[in-house]
Image (cartoon, rainbow, N blue to C red):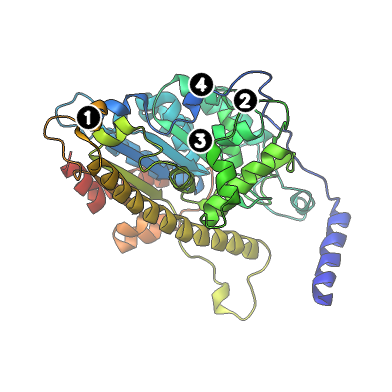
Amino acid sequence: MSALRSIGVVVTTCALLLGCTSVYNLPANVPLAGASLDPNLDAVFKDAAEQDDLLIGFSFSGGGTRAAAFSFGVLEELGSIRMRGASDTMLERIDFLSGVSGGSVTAAYYGLKKRAALSDFRERFLLQNAEAGLTTQLSLGTIGRALGGGINDSKGFTSWLDANLFQNATFGSLRNSGSPRVWINASDIYNRVPFVFDNTAFAAICSDLSKYPLSGAVAASAAVPLAFAPAVVQAFPGTCNEPLPPWVARAAANRNASPMLSAYSKAVMRYRDGAVPYIKLMDGGLVDNYGVSALTIVRESSETPYGPMTPQQAVRLRRGIFMVVDSKVGLSGNWINTVEGPEGVDLIKAAVDTTMDASIGSSYTAFDRTMKDWQSSLIKWRCGLSAAERARYGARPGWRCTDLQLFVGRLGFDQLDPARAAVLEAVPTRFQLPQGQVDDLILAGRETLRASSVFRAFASGI
């Protein structure tokens, strides 16, 4: 303990000598002010899903421009796959996208622009220097700011995103542009849970999600510790009558709820009762770098075998696919060759990478299990329907209750040739990359989707 105190004294002294400056962000959200949250902002699946027998979702992991380019390649490939007997491609059939950090940039921009994003995202973002105006090095001149909250506040990054990509678009703009639904994921570092920019969280804090800027959500999702100060969302407890979903209180009181659902529901209750006036958000990868926790929570919180779908959607559904686009960086560091180390920046980087890698294992395992259980529950429910119920919910001639399959898969660099995978895994987590690396990552995204046995199995059945 005395050694820890000594370290603390040294760090504090260094901060004082270097002029430790408090760095913080002001909240960008506004109160509901008598309005109601748009229920369409919380819908998981597209409006036309009741007339569709497919369910398609992708989650884009974190990893700076490396992740943004790799996930963009996946979207490009989806845009080249024609649907059998239809005029559109599989790209237009995506029901929801989830994004973390760099992956959230791709998810948000595609959600806003749809197919038009394919024509300009590379030039407007992937080939640009999104670090312009940011301080990206930890040095004697910046350590005081790092210890004071973060080297950068969010103004530089959000301003750049609005000027070059989003043009001040909000979640309301996202809704007005139609499907797919988009989830942006950050980490609530006090409650240690995912923070999803959706109606559940914003109802709890009595805030208007439709007015929240996309740039702010993406910046929060990408706020790496020390490099950025936490993004701040303010709660306005007692200022609205917006009800919380019934499952929140039920899950918070349920001692048998899964750890993920229990922790999240208790955090939402704290938002509502004013126990957390200011929610501090950082990189979504700290708790779930795959961005799948949101769907896991939505499914686990459902009171029906088919939720979050409607009965009509659940009856019509034949095939569903949920794929994680994993842009994880490879192992690095030469400190394993010496007794000393890691130190300084290397130590911080190793700690953050370890946290993120640990999070993806647990979140993906929970997600995969939840999807398997959901498929079983759906089939059991469908096979228990009466003839009248089947007709009411839109079962077509020849419909079979067991004709349902949900596919879960992952796309990653490790599915490519080992030598090529090693090159891609070594691409740094930056928001500025050379054109050659960007184009290699885009091509890799296309090729991994094309080669995926899970995706091919799904596509062959439609």
The answer to whether the residues at label 3 and label 4 have Cβ atoms under 8 Å apart is: no
Q: Nearer the viewer, mark 1 or mark 3?
A: 1
- Mark 2 in CB contact with mark 4 (< 8 angstroms): no
Residue under numbered circle 1: 388
> Which of labels 4 and 1 is toward the front?
1
Dot label at residue 208: 2
Do residues under tags 2 and 3 come within 8 Å of each other at their CB atoms? no
Task: State the residue at coordinates (41%, 47%).
Answer: 437
Which residue is under mark 4? 173
Q: Which mark is residue 128?
A: 3
Which is nearer the N-term, disc 2 or disc 3?
Answer: 3
Give the mark nearest the N terminus, 1 or 3.
3
The outermost residue toward the bottom is 339
Q: Earlier in the sequence, mark 4 or mark 1?
A: 4
Q: Amino acid at mark 2?
A: Asp
Kindly report which numbered mark, 2 or 1, lies closer to the viewer in this rendering.
1
Residues at marks 4 and 1, CA–CA distance in whole angstroms = 40 Å
Q: Please, what is the three-letter code of the amino acid marked with disc 4?
A: Ser
Label 3: state its secondary structure: loop
Q: Amino acid at mark 3?
A: Gln
